[in-house]
Image (spheres, coloured by chain):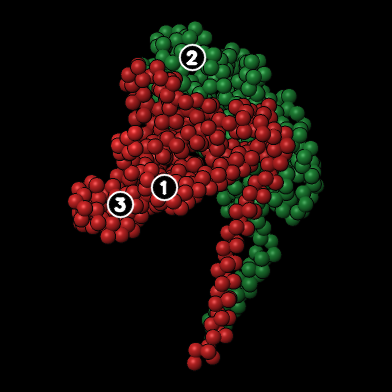
Chain colours: A red, B green
Amino acid sequence: MSSTRLPFRLGGDLSFRIFTGFFALLLIVIVVAIGAELWRNSLLSIQKFGFNFWATRIWDPVAGEFGALPFIWGTLYSAILALVLSTPVALGIAVFLSEMAPGWARQPLVFLTELLAAIPSIVYGVWGAFVLAPWVRSLQVHMPDALRATPFFSGPPLGYGMLAAGLILSVMVIPYSASVAREVLKAVPLAQREAAYALGATRWEAIRAALFFARTGIVGAVMLGFGRALGETMAVTMVIGNNPQVSWSLNAPQYTMAAVIANEFTEAADDLYLNALVEIGLVLFAITLVINMCSRLLIMSMTRSPKAKVQAEAPVLPEPKAA
Amino acid sequence: MKSLVTMSRRGALTLLVAAASVLGVSAQNVQINGAGATFPNPIYSKWFAEYNKLHPTVAINYQSIGSGAGIRQITNQTVFFGATDGPMTNDQLQGAPGKILHFPTVLGAVVPIYNIEGVNQELKFTGPALADIFLGKITKWNDPAIAKANPGVNLPATDITVAHRSDGSGTSYIWVDFLAKVSPEWKQRVGVATSVNWPTGVGAKGNEGVSGLVKQTPGAIGYVELIYALQNKISYGSVQNAAGEFVKASVQAVTAAAAVAAKSMPKDFRVSITNAPGQGVYPVSSFTWLLLYENPKDKAQAKIFVEFLKWALTDGQKFATELGYAPLPEEVVKLEMAVIPQIKL
């Protein structure tokens, strides 16, 4: 009976394979097409500025001089800042929700974290511009002089600037990394925890064991948030101050790649200007690609050699080979 | 009996009329697409809606996607007409496949807004002082260049924070065009465009962004469209004009600037009226323009649009003031009416 149905099944399998394969291929085609189109539309700027485009600090539409450095700097700085600010909070939320929250509180809290992700970024932007930025400003005004003397807090207190951008990005990123990290922690086999308890571990030690078990997934969750922070446009442009400069100062107004494209694309009438803006898009595309690949590699290296990892993570005992 | 006949007759008649109107509509219904500047969008929307009431078969679509995008779209002939806040440059005109005509439609103005703790009076600004503030050369509110124009005002030694538009915009164009006229250094170092390389300050998105930033930051100065300031009841400063008077922007003062410009209007209407000479003139004013091909491809659309343009320049002007725009002075309307026949129908 089964032999009579086999040809049909094969046919069904084959067409299903082609069907799904087509969509997988489509994805690759779309990514390549985006890259090619960005390249094609920024040729003028690529030919004129070459690699200097990456290293020039001037962005002058009137004189026709374009450099992406301040925007690259601002994008990476704000995204890393968001990463640093959001990761501890997101991990805390994830651990609490998966390990410690009482049953009745879990669902409402999960719902609330996911709600944060559902808020449109323009709403974050308006809140950032009208509530967060003045708040950051008063923080900057009341900052002790010793702090203000450091390069991280130099410059006048404006409210609008890198600190406000990092804060708003971290709030936007938290739901992403928190919910993925929570899912990952939930997937840690119960046996892991039971084994830890069986060895006499405290709750904190058992959670640490679970965190260690889930480390790849957690890195993935954090990188997901990073990717989101790199590309965020509307909320950032409303609080970052939009001034293309390379500065360590969190008080200084700066600029990101996505923001400059959103701000200037509609009014860019001449070809070189437009090409330079598209090249900014190309640079952002390339940077996102590289960062995603790096995070893939990081995750792969963590999963490939668990033994080496375990050794590295194992507490360094003071006594090995005492001689 | 009789009533039945009349009824059926009337029924037939209505049917006939309905059929005719349906046929007529399908034969004449015209849709015209345009795109460009955001600044005149409220008045253009009003015009297209009012004109549609008068001529139900004409529907004009306008997308306010920015002056630069409007220029690109008309150059690529993807829309029938364009709109811009800054006239097209010679390079841009040469890049178009045909000759493009500029038609001024209404006027707007840009006003300085500021927030200084303890100062409630309306401040007066000279052009060079504004330019030096935006160049980052004047950094304190009690600078002599500001204080001299404001005798009796107790200006504090607060730091000035400059707020400008981060998005490319016609508002910025008018503002920097004025600064370039009054300050050779601005002209040489920064120049005039819808987005420039700002020497100092914080960029905020849109009129609402700039006014919000100024409101929240003590010591801030920015600029917004006159309409925006009027609608939101934001107080603004006056600016010294070429005749030496400090003028507070108003619809009349803006129209006055255009009337002066009419006397020396170039044939293609590509004129900047910032810092215009004459009494009572507000110096940070500008036209906004519609862009049309001299020899449009679609003649049917062209005929209808020319009729609309004539209406907008005459009857349509009465809608300008209520929306905060300054209407065109009659001299300019006359000049434009003389150019309209150039369009090849």
Q: Name which quarter of the figure residue A88 lies in.
A: top left
Q: Residues within 10 Å of mark 3 (few under 14, many from 20)?
A: many
Alpha carbons under labels 1 and 2: distance apart: 59 Å
Alpha carbons under labels 3 and 1: distance apart: 18 Å
Q: Are marks 2 and 3 on the same chain?
A: no
Q: Position of residue B133 (x, y in %)?
A: 53, 17
- Residue under numbered circle 1: A308
In the displayed structure, does residue A299 sit left or right of residue B290?
Answer: left
Chain containing the residue with disc 2 = B
Residue at the extreme bottom? A1
Q: Position of residue B239 (x, y in %)?
A: 54, 18
Task: Report the amino acid beneath label 3.
Answer: Ala
Res B139 label? 2
In the displayed structure, does residue A287 sit left or right of residue B68?
Answer: left
- Residue under numbered circle 3: A210
Q: Position of residue A268 (x, y in %)?
A: 64, 37
Dot 2: element: loop
Chain containing the residue with disc 1 = A
